[in-house]
Amino acid sequence: MIFRDRWRRRRVAKSRARRAVETIGWVGAALAIRWALLDAYVVPSGSMLPTLLIGDRMFVDKTAYGLRVPFTTTWLVRWATPARGQVVIFVDPADSTRILVKRVVAVAGDRLQWDERGLVLNGIPVAQRPLPDGKRWHSEVPRGIPVVCGGDRIARRPPPPDARRARQYA
């Protein structure tokens, strides 16, 4: 009888230890996936209207451009750079607590000009909004620093129909 009680205590102790190890393993795996592979974000503002609505939720592929050292901005491996037209998510340089969602307008080597016609990229007008007070601006995009802008500032083809609205009326 004494032998059975000891055996049961050991069995219970082993199962608790095993559950703790499994729980730590699952939590570690979830954190690793979130750090290295994908993350979920909520669109914080209307700068990307009508493409993305305020409050839209999205999953982001963190391996699209390479792998980073955990909790730093240092790249382990980098295999791509953002291309013109892609939507990117990044930390606001002025306020590290804010996440920004923008579209890449220009990449390395592009010539940008903002004048009375609006935004001109490599000699082709791409946005109809001129700067206020007739100001002018021009620059060549340096290597490694893409120029981003909110989606509502660029004259693009009509956005695809929003599936949520289509279901409401269908």
Image (tube, grey):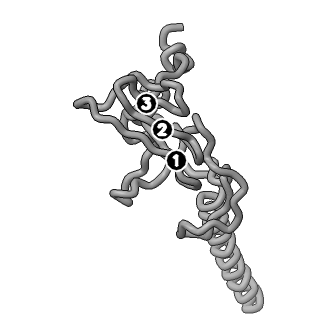
Q: Position of residue 155 (x, y in %)?
A: 47, 22
Kindly give the residue lying farthest to the left in the view shown: 133
Q: Eyeballing the image, is 138 above or below 78?
A: above
Q: Do the residues labelled 1 and 2 touch (CB within 8 Å)?
A: yes
Q: Do the residues labelled 1 and 3 touch (CB within 8 Å)?
A: no
Q: Nearer the viewer, residue 37 or 137?
A: 137
Q: Which of 13 and 44 is in front in this view?
A: 44
* Residue hosting label 2: 112
* Residue hosting label 1: 141
Give, as a three-letter code, the residue at label 3.
Leu
Residue appearing at x 69%, y 51% in the figure = 80
Q: Are marks 3 and 2 in contact (CB under 8 Å)?
A: yes
Q: Quadrant of residue 157?
A: top right
Looking at the rendered structure, the secondary structure element under dot 1 is loop
Report whether 66 appears left or right of 161.
Answer: right
Give, as a three-letter code, the residue at label 2.
Leu
Looking at the rendered structure, the secondary structure element under dot 3 is strand
Give, as a three-letter code, the residue at label 1.
Val
Q: Earlier in the sequence, mark 3 or mark 2?
A: 2
Q: Can residue 71 be seen in this view?
A: yes
Judge the density around disc 2: few (<14), some (14-19), many (≥20) Cα neighbours within 10 Å: many
* Residue hosting label 3: 119
Q: Earlier in the sequence, mark 1 or mark 2?
A: 2
